[in-house]
Amino acid sequence: MPPALRRLTRFLTAHLDGVLLSSILLMMFAGLLVLLSASNGSLARTSGQLVNMLIALSVMWVFANIPPHFLQRLALPLFILGCALLVGVALVGDIVNGARRWLNIGITRIQPSELMKIALPLMLAWYFNRNEATLRLRNYLVAGLLLAFPAALILRQPDLGTALMISASGGYLIFLAGLPWRIIILLGVAGLTSLPFLWSAMHDYQRQRVLTLLDPTTDPLGTGYHTIQSTIAVGSGGALGKGWMNGTQTHLDFIPERTTDFIFAVYAEEFGLLGNAVLLVMFLFVIARAMVITSNAPTLFTRLLAGSITMTFFTYAFVNMGMVSGILPVVGVPLPLISYGGTSLVSICLGFGILMSINTHKKLVQT
Amino acid sequence: MSELSINPGIEIRDSERELQRFRSRLAMLGVFVLTLFGLLFLRFFYLQVIQHSHYSTLAEANRISIQPIAPHRGIIVDRNGVQLAHNYSAYTLEITPSKVSDLNATIDELATVVEISPRDRRRFRKLLEESKRFESLPIRTRLSDEEIARFAAHRYRFPGVEAKARLFRQYPQGEMFSHVVGHIGRINQREVEQLENDGRLANYRGSDYIGKTGLEQSYEKFLHGTTGVEEVEVDSGGRAVRTLSRTPPVSGNNLVLNIDAKLQEIAYNAFGDRRGALVAIDPATGGILAFVSKPGFDPNLFVDGIDPQSWAELNGSIDKPLLNRAAAGTYPPGSTFKPFMALAALFYGKRTPQQVISDPGYFMFGGHRFRDGRPVPLGAVDMHRSIVVSSDVYYYSLANELGIDPIAKFMALFGFGSRTGIDITGEAAGVLPSTEWKMRRFKQRWYPGETISIGIGQGYNSYTPLQLASAMATLANDGIMFRPHIVNYVEDIRTSEKSPIEPKPLRDLGLKPEHLKIVKDAMVGVNKEGTGARAFAGAPYIAGGKTGTAQVIAIKQGEKYVESRVAERHRDHAWFIAFAPAEQPKIALAVIAENSGFGARAAAPVARQVIDYYLLGKVPNKPAPAEDD
């Protein structure tokens, strides 16, 4: 190999993680196949997703090449910006479909809650890292407040799904940062006792979703329709599935949002329990690799950040599959790497980019 | 790690302990991940293995829709193949109310695309009240090709609205056959229950219509056919994607009638503006040749549900177009009863044909004076003359001699006072008076004085034109009685197999030929030299007949009935019964012309035109003239 080419290859691959990258690519490929079926063989949607994937992979490459300490410096300003934008949304945001989620910044509309998905873990990791030597109970309290502020703003939009996902990513991080067990137990008890109050604070449509989860048949043509039809799709798939492009629930239009949030119903119908097992193993493999990276991360900041990214990825996958198979309420969460949609892909791959960066820059830190 | 050793040792141990703690927490999360994924796998296993067949069934139920295919209804034709009820295919615009949020707004918007009249709206409202919300109901029928094209272009704006190709029932002969053929209409809740009880509901899955009246109702089982089934794959919107299997429907059988549509038309038109009824029967078979009730109505109005306004018009009309006068209208038979009374006299041996009765123009009984309709006394009257000139006195005294119960017993043989069993429903039984009847009806005994006017067909006597026609046919056929039937045979259109309706005689009355001859000869005399002579003048065949007048209001003792003084609706009904040719009758009939005065004047000319056409093929060019008596 000529030295120039070798240098180019090295430039391109130096900060990538081969194991992670290959499993991500494999899942993306599987996602494209499912999408092709879900969109009734429409190449337009599938090739659109292919473009999304290329963009997401580029973002991943860029973030893989940004050293973690650089992100560490960005954490505070990003978080402040994110919070400011969320406040802006609450005050002057655009209402779409009954929820105030978008902020018009002149050239385009943005959804600040998306930024918060990465800004919050960065901020918390930065905060714990800063106080590493002197961690007190008070620090966890501050971290909790840092988490609660944006989460409350997002919940108010209202966007229950995103608020939960952001809370989860922050929660995992605080747990990994060593939140004492007594506090965890206390929070658990408090959480259970506050359920009735939470119920009364919920919006009608959110309550409806919870009720529908408990018994989807109460509203088979309304809110229960999604769950009933996706459960039928999964169940009728059987052990080996109906075969690619052969799902009747999919191709006769019974599964709503089947290219995005409910794409797993398509997959489970066409590939069956065997396919589901393979998919779970693929997810587990990615998560396991990410955990190894997390475990080997050199600093508290990178460890916490990597752990949060890993667990958030897992949570997306679990909540989505749980929702489609009818054990979790319908919250608008995509299936990572499989669902159609650029935003979700980019944010997932951005996370993987950071993981790769953490894994490949630690030697530099150490030397 | 060597570079880090510049830090104090205590810190290394601390951060190593921190790292250990972090790793143990991470390991816990790892266990958490495995647990939740394990839970997911169990859920998948439950759904996809344990509950697989349940969800498979649900998916199939989602996917496959069993759609009934309505059979073509059999058609109804006259004896010569003239269509009386047939089907044609056209488009309708149908709304499924359950799929439409605002019905009025949708209809208003539809009206901008295709024409929707206020009548269409009224009819739709009425259908809506009578049906379930998930049924599709027609808002417009018989759309033109252009309207269909316009709707197709705007279809996306109208979820829950569909254009459907449907078979429509049509009655080309209109009101002329309204009481014979009847009509179909949308199946109502009561009929659904009836079908369910009979176990026939499954066969009506794809059917919206059922026979409501006339032959359409009584031959429903033959006409309807067998519903087919199509298994189609549907998408979530319920649209058929492809057909999986198909059992074709079996068309209903056709009805071929004994009625001659041309004869029916001539009879109908012969009434002119008058109301009335005519039943003509082939005496040798009991087959109905013509069955007229005038006025009729347009049965086509009823097929898709009649709008309330048209219904009110028909139902409220003083002419009672909805009444089937021929089978459900009952009238005193008047003098047309006399030939049967004469037969009864011979049957019981109460009078000989030659026996002469003196007719002074009235009959005294118990201080009552029973008038003859005529101003002049007839003098000596034998049986033949009593029929030819229609002597009342002869029959007053005869009735008195026979007594009410023997009269009732004899008349019952001819079917008076009981339903003939014709093959349409709605027939009235009429009243054949007897002591037993009066006790049952009025809880009173019979007074001998009441028997007198029974002899001339008045009093409690009340029969349908159909009964009179049937009795006439039985007499003409020498006492061999058939059940009158409109349908000649039912034809299976696949096998062309013909199933005749009642070809066998019902009963033989056992009348003596010499008795029959006396009465028939007298009836021939009526048309030759008696009350029917004017109407049958110049007929190239020999016909027997008898005129009759049915009183609408009672005339007081000592008062004279003067037609011009009586309101039109209170005038007497004119009767005529006839058979021809006399030696071997091919047609027997009964005609009633309501409020038309004496039978000879309005009813006999109608009979003449009908018999002329039936025997000679002669088509009259105007309604039967009303003659002066």
Image: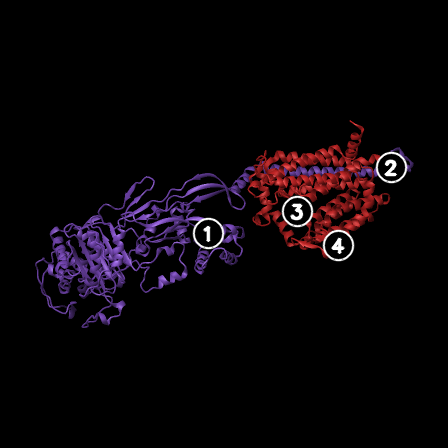
Residue A332, label in figure:
3
Q: Nearer the viewer, residue B338 or B599?
A: B599
Q: Which amino acid does label 4 sit on?
A: Val
Give the image location of residue B47, x and y in percent.
59, 39
**Residue at (89, 34) in percent of width and height:** B3
Q: Mark 3 lies on which chain?
A: A
| SS at mark 1 in the image | helix
| SS at mark 2 in the image | helix
Give the image location of residue B178, x and y in percent.
32, 55
Q: Chain B is drawn in which colour?
A: purple
Residue labelled with disc 4: A87
Residue B428 visible: no
- Same chain under badges 1 and 3? The reply is no
The part of the image, by quadrant, that contains residue B504 is: top left
Number of the front mark, 3 or 4: 4
For residue B480, side relative to residue B147 (left or right): left
> Which chain does red denote in the image?
A
Residue labelled with disc 2: B13
Give the image location of residue A153, x and y in percent.
73, 53
C-alpha distance separating marks 1 and 3: 46 Å
| SS at mark 4 in the image | helix
- Same chain under badges 4 and 2? The reply is no
Of mark 3 and mark 4, the one earlier in the sequence is 4
Q: What residue type is labelled 1?
A: Glu
Q: Which chain carries label 2?
A: B
